[in-house]
Image (cartoon, rainbow, N blue to C red):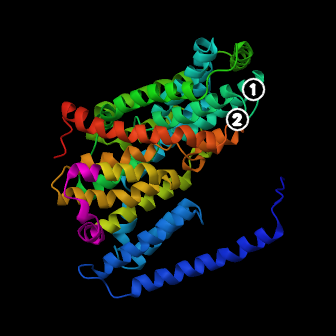
């Protein structure tokens, strides 16, 4: 049994423990006042209650005073309790297709990782293409990105992190001082972040956005349609990111022979490719083909869950092998976010916010698109990606209706930038792991991250202006 010792001064510990009850008491008083104050003109009582729940969740999400999943559960409880939606409507929304797609994606990623296939792929790529210092860095960068096309970027970072620590030690890199060490771990973080926005599989935020879009408008964005729309941005950001790291952290090691020995030793330890690895790889490949070819007709969740059933029917995996990879907190969190978004929409709160606040600067669709994408890309540094989508997307969809713009186009303005977090370690687990290595500092991450955020925002808007009309997505007027 492990014991953690808090080494902070006693006065800090006591202050924090005493302030926590005061924080929740103040929050409860403000919430009670808001739901009981006279409703502003044009806002229904249900809409007022929806905004109160929204603001409460916003504070809890930003402060992280309770786990994100618990905040979402709180929203699930309050929405029917305050009469915003009926109990039947509320709990039915938790069965949204996006929630089950996320569940299926977790199980499929768990099968890939448990079988050892992902580790084998990573080691083989680094072993074959990492013969020189620059090629090793490029291999890690592209490997993190490409794996994040098909797995949660969080899982990819967790899988590659121990391997990079071992490589760093074998190269005798000095934590916090070696340029090569900084480059190596930033390559891991940035690769995961950039690759994570390329498909629906890099994180649950894009399926969440699609779930809110479908729930509020009935419109959908297909798996292939989304990837085709954002892939040029991903490719350009990978090129810019690697070039920027080369400028910021010039290579300061002569060779990487020791790293090659580490990779070769670990590969030998894996032995020959097993039947389970072959089977999981084939099923994952067929699943991706199914998402591309039948995602719109059958639904992404149906394809994912069908593959999950096949895995278990054929005995390729067992539940006890997979359950540790299923993050039930994330699933609860996304279910609650979808319910909160629907509550804002159906109660009329989103429309009221649009008319009274945002409507003042919503004359030009391009202006709105640019401002929303900028707001999203900076909010995602301080808030959960899912929280940003839950907060902004219902309002943005409402704006699109007011301006007679296709809501699918405006959905991109939130769904894609919400994953481009480069500046702070708390913005995504990939960044947090990189900083926890001690090879880079928060200052190192922020120095290049701010440049990447600005470049990402500019490129994203240019892509929307010039590339999207060419592939038939539509034009903002």
Residue toward you, 472 or 304: 472
Could you tell whether 476 is left or right of 152 in the image? left
Q: Please tell me which residue is depicted at 26% across the width and 71% down the height of the picture.
A: 356
Q: Please tell me which residue is depicted at 32% across the width and 37% down the height of the picture.
A: 226
Could you tell whether 399 is left or right of 477 in the image? right
The answer to whether the residues at label 2 and label 1 have Cβ atoms under 8 Å apart is yes
The tag on residue 439 is 2
Answer with the quarter of the image where residue 134 lies. Answer: top right
Residue toward you, 218 or 91: 218
Residue toward you, 70 or 59: 59
**Sequence order check, earlier mark of 2 and 1:** 1
Q: Position of residue 386 (x, y in %)?
A: 45, 53
Does 129 lie within the magenta span?
Answer: no
Q: Position of residue 439 (x, y in %)?
A: 70, 35
Does 351 lie within the magenta span?
Answer: yes
Residue toward you, 435 or 411: 435
Q: Position of residue 263 (x, y in %)?
A: 69, 18
- Determine which residue is flagged by label 1: 173
Q: Please tell me which residue is depicted at 28% across the width and 64% down the height of the picture.
A: 358
Q: Is residue 98 visible?
A: no
Q: Please tell me which residue is depicted at 63% across the width and 11% down the height of the picture.
A: 131
Q: CA distance from mark 2 to mark 1?
A: 8 Å
Could you tell whether 256 is left or right of 103 in the image? right
Decide: few, some or many residues near mark 2? Use Cα within 10 Å; few <14, some 14-19, many ≥20. Answer: many
Answer with the quarter of the image where residue 137 lies. Answer: top right
Give the residues drawn in magenta, as a range.
Answer: 346-369
Q: Position of residue 402 (x, y in %)?
A: 18, 60
């Amino acid at each position: 049994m492990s014991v953690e010792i808090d080494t902070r001064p006693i006065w800090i510990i006591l202050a924090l423990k005493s302030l926590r009850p005061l924080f929740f008491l103040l929050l409860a008083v403000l919430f009670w006042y808001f739901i009981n104050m006279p409703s502003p003109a044009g806002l229904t009582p249900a809409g007022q209650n929806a905004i109160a729940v929204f603001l409460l969740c916003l504070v809890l999400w930003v402060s992280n005073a309770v786990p994100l999943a618990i905040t979402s559960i709180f929203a699930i409880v309050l929405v029917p309790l305050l009469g915003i939606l009926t109990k039947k409507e509320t709990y039915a929304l938790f069965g949204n297709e996006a929630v089950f797609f996320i569940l299926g994606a977790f199980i499929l990623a768990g099968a890939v990782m448990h079988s050892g296939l992902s580790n084998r792929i990573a080691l083989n790529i680094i072993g074959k293409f990492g013969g020189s210092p620059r090629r090793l860095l490029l291999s890690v960068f592209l490997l993190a990105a490409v794996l994040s096309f098909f797995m949660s970027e969080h899982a990819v970072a967790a899988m590659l992190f121990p391997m990079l620590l071992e490589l760093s030690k074998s190269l005798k890199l000095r934590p916090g001082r070696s340029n090569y060490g900084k480059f190596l771990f930033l390559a891991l973080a940035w690769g995961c972040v950039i690759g994570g926005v390329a498909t629906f599989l890099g994180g649950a935020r894009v399926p969440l956005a699609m779930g809110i879009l479908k729930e509020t408008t009935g419109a959908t964005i297909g798996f292939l349609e989304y990837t085709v729309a954002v892939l040029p941005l991903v490719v350009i950001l990978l090129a810019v990111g690697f070039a920027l790291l080369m400028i910021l952290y010039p290579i300061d090691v002569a060779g990487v022979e020791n790293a090659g020995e580490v990779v070769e030793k670990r590969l030998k330890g894996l032995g020959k490719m097993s039947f389970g690895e072959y089977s999981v790889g084939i099923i994952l490949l067929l699943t991706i083909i199914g998402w591309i070819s039948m995602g719109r007709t059958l639904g992404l969740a149906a394809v994912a869950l069908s593959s999950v059933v096949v895995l278990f029917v054929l005995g390729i995996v067992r539940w006890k092998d997979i359950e540790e990879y299923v993050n039930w907190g994330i699933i609860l969190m996304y279910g609650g976010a979808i319910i909160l978004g629907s509550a804002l929409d159906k109660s009329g709160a989103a429309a009221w916010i649009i008319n009274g606040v945002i409507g003042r600067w919503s004359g030009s669709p391009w202006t709105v698109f640019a401002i929303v994408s900028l707001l999203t890309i900076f909010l995602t540094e301080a808030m959960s990606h899912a929280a940003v989508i839950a907060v902004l997307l219902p309002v943005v969809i409402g704006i699109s209706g007011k301006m007679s713009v296709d809501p699918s186009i405006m959905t991109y303005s939130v769904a894609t930038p919400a994953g481009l977090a480069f500046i702070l370690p708390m913005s995504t687990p990939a960044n947090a792991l990189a900083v926890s290595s001690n090879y880079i500092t928060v200052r190192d991450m922020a120095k290049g991250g701010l440049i990447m955020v600005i470049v990402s925002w500019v490129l994203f808007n240019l892509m929307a202006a010039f590339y999207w009309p060419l592939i038939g997505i539509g034009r903002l007027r």
